[in-house]
Image (cartoon, grey):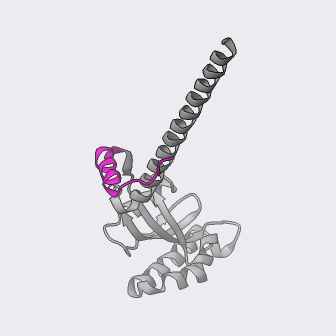
Amino acid sequence: AKSANVAELDVQIFYHMHREQFMRTERRGASHILVTINPDLPENTPALALKKISEIRKRLLKDPKRFAEQALKHSECPTAMNGGTIGDVDRGKLYPALDAALFAAKAVGELSEVVESELGYHIVRCDSIRAEGVAPYAEVAPRIRLVMEQNRRKLCQHGWLKELQEAAAAKAREAEALQEH
């Protein structure tokens, strides 16, 4: 059987001829700190929760490197255990107010104003920005190569099976011809 290896040039040609297949949406890395509102708890009334999150934001504006520490110490979200990290997020996947704050950020490291959601008050930090557009060749080339190799393997297997079927049919015709004589 023939080799299923794919030449680098073939991968590049496929990428350039099918760029629309490699479009990706804008994505942002996000972290946040949440102070919940719970009128049943005296320390979590709307006014006190807003005061607390505003004080945290002031501290972070003075020393942004303390975000993870402040999240661990003050955030009431399970992400606090991971320094407030939410991870990479596509537009439209968070609560609308958080989404708007995250995607309004102009630069990595930017802190939002205090944002109110159904859960309470948040500070959102933009950790990374991946622009919308065609994924870079280096990112998708391994996947293209794998698919092309799999397709070539299938073609080789089909060709091999066809050869076997033709050989078997020829032998059957030979055997039939011998039986007739």
115 with respect to 40 (left or right): left
141 displayed left or right of 79: left
Q: Which residues are magenta?
A: 1-20
Q: Residue at x 29, y 44 (%)?
A: 17
* Left or right: 96 as drawn, with respect to 175: left
Observer able to see residue 131: no
Q: Would residue 76 be found to the left or right of residue 16 on screen?
A: right
Tell me if residue 2 comes above or below residue 164 in the rendering.
below
| Residue 78, x across and y down, in percent | 64, 71
Badge count? 0
Residue 15 inside the magenta-drawn segment: yes
Viewer-proximal residue among 150 and 114: 150
- Residue 60 lies, with reference to residue 31, above or below; the image says below
Most extreme residue toward the top is 180
Q: Residue 39 at x, y = what percent?
A: 66, 66
Question: Measuring 32% from the left and 71% from the top, which residue is drawn there?
Answer: 107
Counting from the top left corner in percent of width and height, residue 97 is at 46, 57
Main SS category, magenta section: helix
The residue drawn where x is 50% and y is 42% is: 156
**Residue 176 picture location, percent across and down:** 66, 17
Residue 174 visible in the current orientation = yes
Task: Give the position of the C terminus as an image quadrant.
Answer: top right
Residue at left 62%, top 72%?
A: 76
Q: Residue 6 versus residue 37: which sits nearer the camera?
A: 6
| Up/down of 93 relative to 178, above or below | below
Q: Toward the viewer: 117 or 80? A: 80
- 86 in the magenta segment: no
**Quadrant of residue 35 within the rendered picture:** bottom right
